[in-house]
Amino acid sequence: MKPRHKRIALIVGGLASITIAAVLVLKALDSNIALYITPSDVIAGKAPHDKAFRMGGLVKQGSIQREGMTTRFIITDTAKEIPVAYTGILPDLFRDGKGAIVQGRLGADGLFSASEVLAKHDENYMPPEAQHAIDQAQKK
Amino acid sequence: MTNMNLINWFRFASPQSFYPLAGKLVPLFWTLALLFGAAGLWVSFFVAPTDAQQGEGYRIIFVHVPASWMSMIIYLAMAFWAGLGLALNTRLSSMMAQALAPTGALMAALSLWTGAFWGKPMWGAWWVWDARLTSELILFFLYVGFIALQSAIDDPRRADKAGAILALIGVVNVPIIYFSVKWWNTLHQGSTINLTRAPSMAHTMLWGMLLMALAFWMYSIAVSLMRLRAIMLERERHTEWVKHALE
């Protein structure tokens, strides 16, 4: 074996072992890497009881109610729903039917009191006319 | 015949013969960068329509997305050249890796910075520790670490070896950045442009983004070649060809 071949073999072997190590670490940390859990996870009892956590999903259509500075809405993953209350300023992209991530605690009454609301934007970019056309088509 | 081709190809693997070639390529890539940049900015600001959800603020993607792409592509190129230098002991490939690192770091920083500017109005947060943002931050630190490690070691051969090992270890991070939005729940949205399906974006927006991406490519190549020329002169300063080149 030439020294050059030996070095190439070492590099390939090294890369392979680093990849395996990375995959194992990421597998082990899987639930910690996720930024949020879904309402289904919460109902399945995966949410921590004693500390704040993040929950993400869609803002249920027509569920937004404003009372002064407090906003109440429902976060859904289309299977399960959790009501949320938040006092403060909402981000621009917080909209009916769009994605949102709330951070806070789940009360004993099942109401999630959020201390922070983030809007999750989707990967679609389109001009207002196109959006309008889609909205019209959906109404029919 | 094949043998002849092989020899001609490897001729440019020596700094001595690549130096004048790089010198000729630099103005070409600068010209292309300016042309694509001007066209890209014009399409991005005047042709591309407003976004239905995000309004005018979405236009930051015309810088953010190309910068993020470049930060990943440059890292792959840097690791490739560093690995080649480590395996084959070729002088030029290690210099290539060294020349690419600062531009890559700039692109990663630009991506994080423009991302924060976009995140505040759209998401409601400058920064979130989600998988996409965190792995991009790690990429930035890998670049900075590579530059620091190389500059900390005086002997260039040893500096190249140490840097190459760091660059190769860091390569695992690139697919993590790219697929993070698929593998985990993240605040960052999924990718708009995919190899597997049509892009979910209006055509003129897409054009603006692709032109800007080309401009970023050309700019990165131009500055990396300029830096490479400086590195070649510095490292080979005791040789005859440098003395001739500088006359």
Image: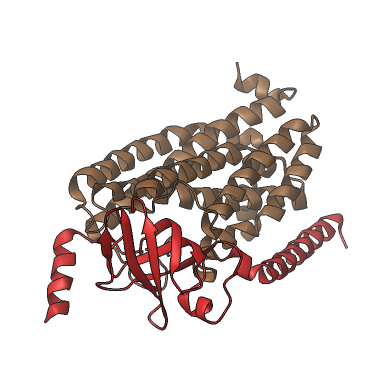
Chain colours: A red, B brown
Farthest-out residue, top: B247
Residue B191 appears in the figure: no
- Residue at 60% across / 16% down in the picture? B247
Farthest-out residue, front: A109
> Quadrant of the rendered structure where residue A58 is?
bottom left
Vertical placement of residue B241 versus B167, above or below: above
Vertical placement of residue B94 versus B170, above or below: above
Task: Say which of B109 and B119 sits in front.
Answer: B119
Task: Say which of B7 and B19 sits in front.
Answer: B19
Residue B103 percent coordinates (x, y): 53, 39
Q: Is residue B143 left or right of residue A98?
A: right
Vertical placement of residue B164 versus B233, above or below: below
Residue B42 percent coordinates (x, y): 23, 42
Residue B16 percent coordinates (x, y): 65, 33
Which quadrant of the figure contains the C terminus of chain A? bottom left
Residue B218 percent coordinates (x, y): 43, 42
Vertical placement of residue B235 versus A64, above or below: above
Residue B179 appears in the figure: yes
Q: How many marks?
A: 0
Task: Say which of A67 and B150 sits in front.
Answer: A67
Task: Say which of B66 and B235 sits in front.
Answer: B66
- Residue at 29% across / 70% down in the picture? A97
Which quadrant of the figure contains the N terminus of chain A? bottom right
- Residue at 55% across / 43% down in the picture? B104
- Residue at 69% across / 42% down in the picture? B94
